[in-house]
Amino acid sequence: MTFTLDEIYETARMILFEKLDIRTTTLGINIKDCVHSNFQTFLNRVHHKIVKYGKVLTKKARQVEIKYGVPIVNKRISITPISLVMETHAKTKKFLQMAKTIDNAAKESGIDYIGGFGALVHKGITNAEKILIRCLPEILASTERVCSFINAGSTNSGLNIDAVNIAGEILFETAHKTKNGSGCTKLVVFVNAPEDNPFMAGAFHGPGEPDFSLNIGISGPGVVRSVVEKNPDCDITQLAEIIKRTVFKITRAGELIGRELANDIGVPFGIVDISLAPTPLPGDSVAQIIEAFGIEKIGAHGSTFAIALLMDAVKKGGAMASGNVGGLSGTFIPVSEDAGMAEAVEKGALTLEKIESFTSVCSVGLDMVAIPGDTPPEIISAIIADILAIGIINNKTTATRIIPVPGKKAGEKVFFGGLLGEMPVMEVKKLSSSKFMKRGGRMPSPLIALKN
C-alpha cells in the first residue's frame, strides 16, 4: 500500500483539526490453551498470557503513535468467551476469582478494558452459563476493566427469550450494585454478535479466530461532519459519494497503522472496524453529521433516512479501501457518548422509540441509554427484546447497553465521566409486557435463515 504526499497532508489535517483517531487497538487472545484441571494453575496461565501480550501491545502502540502522530485512544484485549473455558470450573466463587485475575492482569499491563467475560446463549443456556450470567452483577461491581456480553440470539437460531429475561434481571441488579448504574456500561446484550469486534463492551475473541488477532477500530465523525458542512448544496447522491470517499481515506490510514502494529507485535492482522464512534468532545458527534445534512435536530422526521444514507456510504467507502473490513462496521449512536445525541434527548427531539427505529439501519441500537432506576426488570427485558428482534429479522447485528440509574427519574441528568459522557435519563413507558415475556422459550428463526 503506497500513499501520496497529498494523502499524508490530508490525514495530518484530519488528525489536527477534525479529531481523527484510532479509537481502539484490540488484541484478541485465545485462552483455551490455558485451561487446566488445577484451577490455580489455570488462573496463573491466564494472568501470565494476558500480561505478556498486553505489555507488548501497550508498548508497541505508543511507538506507532509517536511514529505517525495518530492518537490511539484505547489499548484493549478481548479473550475467548469465558463460558467456553470454565465448564469444568463452573462455580460462582471461581468465576469471581477468574474475573479478578483478568482485571488485575489488564491493570498490570496497562490495558484500558478487557472483553470476553460472557456467554454465547443464542439457542440455549448450559448450567455453567447460567451460573456465569447470574454472578455478572457481582463481577461488574467488583472489577474495573472487565467487560461482559450476552449473545442472546442469531438469525439462524432465533431469539432466546429465556436469556433476554435473565438479562433484564441482571441489568437491574447490576445497576443497584454500582454508582449511577455504571456497571451496566460494561455489559452488552447482542444478537448476531461478530467474533472480531474491537469495540467494548461487547468484544470477544470468537471460537473461529486464530490464537491471536489485532483488530482496529477507527473513528472519524469530525472528519465526515467537516466534509458534509463544506458541501451544503449537493444532492443526496453526491452527498453519499463525498462521505464514501472520505471514509475510504480514513480506512486506508487505519489499515496502515493496524498492519504495522500487528507486525511489530508479531501477530496476524485481523480487521478494520469502520464504525463512526463518537465521543462527548465538541465536534466529534454522529448526531452533528445528521444535523449537517440539513436536519434541524436528530430525532426529527427524516433522521432514520439520514442515518441509513450515512451507514451505507460508510460501509461502501470502507469496503473499497480494505479487504479486511469487519467487526460491527457501521455507525454508533450511543446517547451519553455523543454530545449531540444527549442534547437532542434533553430538548425532547429524541425519544426511546425514535432511537429504536434507528436500530433498523444502524449498528447497535439502544447504546448507552439511561432509564429510570425503578424500571422493572421485565420492562428492561422487553426493551431489549424489541431491539434484538430487529437484528434477527433483518439478519444484522443489534445490541443494547441500557443503564437503569438508581434514584433517578426521567429528565434528570446522570454523569458517567470520561468517554462515557453524560445524558438525561430517558422516559420509559410503564405499560407492562410481562405476561408475554414470561412465556419464555425461543422466538423461531425467520424464513430468511433457510438459505442453504
Image (tube, rainbow, N blue to C red):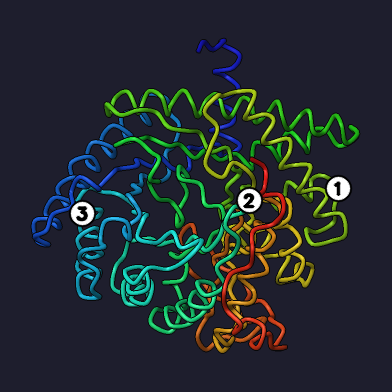
- Give the vertical position of 86 relative to 7 (above or below): below
Locate residue 115 relative to residue 6 in the image: left or right. Answer: left
Q: Quadrant of the C terminus?
A: top right
Q: Are marks 2 and 1 in contact (CB under 8 Å)?
A: no
Residue 285 appears in view: no
The mark lying in front, picked from 2 and 3, is 2
**Amino acid on which disc 3 is placed:** Ala
Label 2 to label 1: alpha-carbon separation: 22 Å
Numbered tag placed on residue 105 in the rendering: 3
Question: Image quadrant of residue 25?
Answer: top left
Q: CA distance from mark 1 to mark 3?
A: 47 Å
Q: Amino acid at mark 2?
A: Ser
The residue under label 1 is 294
Query: In the picture shown, does residue 369 fall above or below 14?
Result: below
Secondary structure, mark 2, is loop
Crowd class of label 2 (few under 14; some 14 to 19; many from 20; radius 10 Å)? many
Residue 421 horizontal/vertical position (percent): 53, 63
Residue drawn at x 50%, y 85% as measured from the top left: 406
Please tell me whether mark 3 sits on a helix, a strand or a loop.
helix
Looking at the image, residue 61 sits to the left or right of residue 305; the answer is left
Label 1 crowd (10 A; few <14 / some 14-19 / many >=20): some
* Disc marking residue 363: 2
Relative depth, front residue between 299 and 99? 99
Amino acid type at mark 1 = Gly
Locate residue 364: give its quadrant: bottom right
Q: Residues within 10 Å of mark 3 (few under 14, many from 20)?
A: many
Of mark 1 and mark 3, the one earlier in the sequence is: 3
For residue 316, which quarter of the picture?
top right
- Mark 2 vs mark 1, foreground winner is 2
82 or 15, which lies in front? 82
